Image: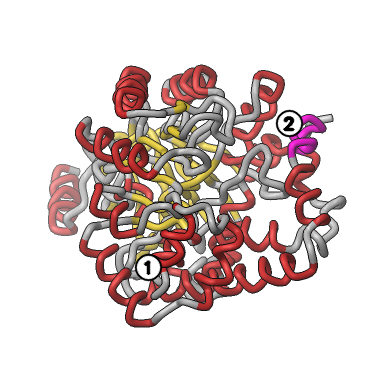
Amino acid sequence: MNRLLFLSLFLLILSGKSEPSTTYDLAITNANIIDLENGSVAVKNIYISKGKIEAVDSNIFKADSTIDATGKYVLPGFWDNHIHLRGGDTLIPNNKNFLKLFIANGITTVRDAGGDLTKEVMDWKSQIADEKLVGPTIFTAGPKIDGPNGSWAGSLEVENEADVIKAVDSLQALKVDFVKIYDSRISPKNYIKSIEEAKKRGFTVSGHMPFTVTLDETINAGMDGIEHLYYIMKGCASNEKEVTDKMNNGEMGFWGAMPELMSGYSESTANATFTKLKEHNVFVVPTLHIGETLSYLDEMDHSTDEYLKYMGSGLIQTYQGRIRSALNSSEEARTNRKQLDAFFGELAKSLDSAGVQLLAGSDSGAFNSYTYPGISLHKELQAMVENGISPLNALRTSTVNGAKFLGQTDGYGNISKGKVSDLVILEANPLENIENTEKIFKVIKGTQVFSKKQLQELLNNAILE
C-alpha cells in the first residue's frame, strides 16, 4: 500500500500537475481571445476576481463559477465614444432606460458628449460604479461650453475671457471626465481660449470646430478630439482660408460652405492635415451611421424600426425637428447632403489609411432621429467596414482607442492581467464579419455576468409605452 502511494505521488510530481493554489471568482475557459492590437486569436482561459482580470493563461484553475467559451470569441466590452444623455427633466426616465440598451448590446462604457442632465448622469455614474444600477461605465463632459444663446439647453455660455475661466472652473468642480466645446454661438477667440484653459487644468478636450477658425488653430491650441467630419473636411480643403474669411465676414453660412469645401478637397492639403493630426495625437469621431440616417430621412420609413419601442413617445417627439428640416429641404439641399454623406465615408477611410486614430461613436440620444442607443454602435462599426476600413481597425476604434483617448489604458483596452473585467463573449468571429458583434452570448461587466437570456430580459424591460 505504501509503495503504491509513493508511486502515485512520484508520478504526479513527474507530470507537473498539482492542485491549484488560487480560487477565482470566475473562469472563462477555452475562449478564443481576440487581441485587438494585432488581430491574433488564441485559445486561453480568463480568470476573474473582484471585477478584475487576474490571469490569462492555460493553467489549472479553481473557480466559484465557470463559463465554457468553447467556440466563442472574447474581446473587451464595446465603447460607444459619442452619446448624449439629455432632453430635460421630462426625459430623465427615457435616458435612464438607455443604460439597459447599452449593456444588452455589449457596450460596457460610454462617453457622454454633453447634455443638460448632469446631476442625474453623475448619480447614475456612481450607482453603476457601485453595481447598484445596470449600465455602462459613464465618462461624461457634463454641460457643453458654447457662446451666448447656444443651441443646446444646459450649455455654459461664454462671452468673454472671464466667462471662459469661470466655465472651465465649474467643470473642474463638477469633476467631469473631459471638456466638450460646441460651435453654435461661440466666438473664435473664446473657442481657442476654452481649449487652452481646459488643457491648463489637465482635461482631455473634444468638440465641434467653428468654421470661423482653421483646423490648424484648433490643433495648435491643444484640441484632443474632433467630433464629426465636417471640420476635418474643412482642414483638407485648399480653400479653407477663403471659406474661413467668408464665415467671419458673414458672407457664408455653415451649410453653404459644404459644397465649396467638398469641391476644394486637395490630396496634398489632406495629407498635410492627416500628418498634423497624427503628430499631435488628435482623435477623430466620424459618426458615419447617424450621417447616413439623417441624410436619408426624406426617403426612409422608420415607423417599423425595432428600437422605436424602447424610446418612448416623449423622446420620439424630439426627432421631429430634424425630420421636418429634411422634408422641407430643397431638392438641391437633399442632393448635397447625400453627396456629403458619401464623401464622409471616403474621408473616414482616408483617415484610417493615413494612420489617424478614429473613435467609434453613435451620437445616439434625444433629438438625433432614429439613431438608437446601443444598436447604433454596431451600425457605426458596420458603416466603417462598408467604407473600406478593416474589421480589426473598426473594432479598435471602439475599445482600444476609446481607452487611449480618455487616458484609461491602465484599466481598459485589452484582455490582460489587471484590467477591469468588462468583456463581451460573441458566438462568431467579428474579424471575419463585423456583423458578428451583434451575436452576443454573454456580457461581463465587472462582477456582473449577463447571460443571453438576461440580456433579452433587459431589452424586454426597456420597452416604453
Whether residue 62 is visible here, answered yes or no, is: no
Element on which disc 1 rests: strand
Vertical placement of 357 versus 307: above or below?
below
Q: In which quarter of the image is the N terminus?
A: top left
Give whichever of 238, 380 is nearer the camera: 238
> What residue is drawn where x is 71% and y is 38%?
459
Which of the two discs, 1 and 2, labels the residue nearer the N terminus? 1
| Type of amino acid at the residue the image marks with label 1 | Val
Mark identifier at residue 461:
2
Lateral position of residue 440 relative to residue 65, left or right: right
Please provide the residue range marked out in magenta.
310-318
Residue 435, image x, y percentages: 60, 65
State the residue lying farthest toward the bottom.
267
- In the image, residue 133 above or below residue 38: above
- Disc number at residue 41? 1
Residue 4 in the image: x percent, y percent? Answer: 19, 49
Q: Distance between the residues labelled 1 and 2?
A: 35 Å
